[in-house]
Amino acid sequence: MMVTKVAVKQLDSIVQGRKEFLAEVNTIGKVEHFHLVRLIGYCAEKSNRLLVYEHMFNGSLDNWIFNQDKARTLGWKTRQEIIYGVAKGLQYLHEECHKNIIHFDIKPQNILLDRDFKAKISDFGFARLIDRNQSLALASLKGTIGYMAPEMYRRLHISVKADIYSFGVVILETICGRKNLEESHESMTLVDIVQMKVEEDQLYDLIGDRDEDIWHHKEEAIKTMKIAIWCLQTYDRRPRISMVVKVLEGSALSRY
């Protein structure tokens, strides 16, 4: 008998769990793309709510980019492919579905890696389907502090560009190997540090020499960091994800 490994997500709170459960089933259950984690099945019996996903052999991205173990250090090409994979997944959600889908919680913990380190976006508990080119106002904040776009706090004019901002943070974290917002909250955020280094024309300082492979590809790493900075601009100046994909592919130039 063939045994298939799966990942099971159990939602905790009965109230919040039902809302997230329905959002996740309604969203991910209707879409399918290589760079989205595949929903295999679900269970909704009384207060028990389970989501069954394909098993991702290498876990989540945060376990690889925030650790100090050199044996678990990702090479530059792998990081580059992960960034590209997340961009392709977002392109599908934002521009290729019958309705736009805002994920609202793009972060390394929600980017899972298969056996070949191909990236797949997971956790659609906060996701919203909206009509194309529509924006919406939120009654409550959605997402994770440190990854939420500035307009989220004003709760006005929210669109797929909120995910673009979060993706910009993820790119920086993936390259620099540190969190945007440290647990102590006492130090400057990574986004603030990057902005300061841009003004000083010293982005190379953030590459460092701890990871020799990234250092050997520092020119490419800096170009990718500039794509991240492009994604972190004010709402009106943020690019569409399809343009980001083209720049990552080398078929277009960044406007930053």
Image (cartoon, rainbow, N blue to C red):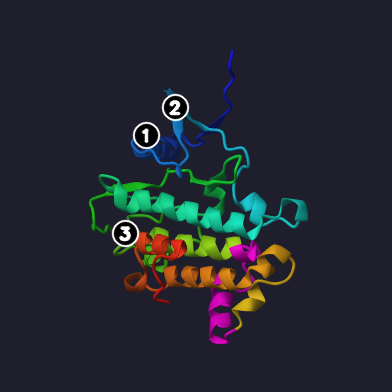
Q: Quadrant of residue 193?
A: bottom right
- Quarter that holds the N terminus: top right
Residue at position x 44%, y 26% in the image: 41
- Residue 68 in the image: x percent, y percent? 75, 57
Task: Specify few, some or many for label 2: CA neighbours under 10 Å numbering under 14, 14-19, or 20 or more.
Answer: some
Of callouts 1 and 2, the N-terminal one: 1
Q: Quadrant of residue 222?
A: bottom right
Q: Position of residue 255 (x, y in %)?
A: 39, 75
Write the start and end of the magenta stretch as one range: 175-201
Say what secondary structure mark 2 lies in. Answer: strand
Q: Is residue 116 left or right of residue 235?
A: right
Tell me the SS state at disc 3. Answer: loop
Alpha carbons under labels 3 and 1: distance apart: 21 Å
Residue corresponding to mark 3: 159
**Label 1 SS:** loop
For mark 1, does the 10 Å Cα neighbourhood hold few (<14), some (14 to 19), or many (20 or more) residues?
A: some
Q: Residue at x 27, y 57 (%)?
A: 136
Mark 2: which amino acid?
Tyr
**Where 92 falls versus 146 (above or below)?**
above
Label 3 sits on what residue type? Answer: Ser
Q: Locate residue 151, reporting x and y percent.
A: 37, 67
Residue 146 visible in the snapshot: no
Label 3 vs label 2: CA separation? 29 Å
Q: Residue furthest bottom?
A: 200
The answer to whether marks 1 and 2 mark residues whose Cβ atoms lie closer than 8 Å is yes
Badge 3 or badge 1: first in the primary sequence: 1
Kindly identify which residue carries mark 2: 42
Q: Residue at x 41, y 35 (%)?
A: 21
The residue labelled by disc 1 is: 29
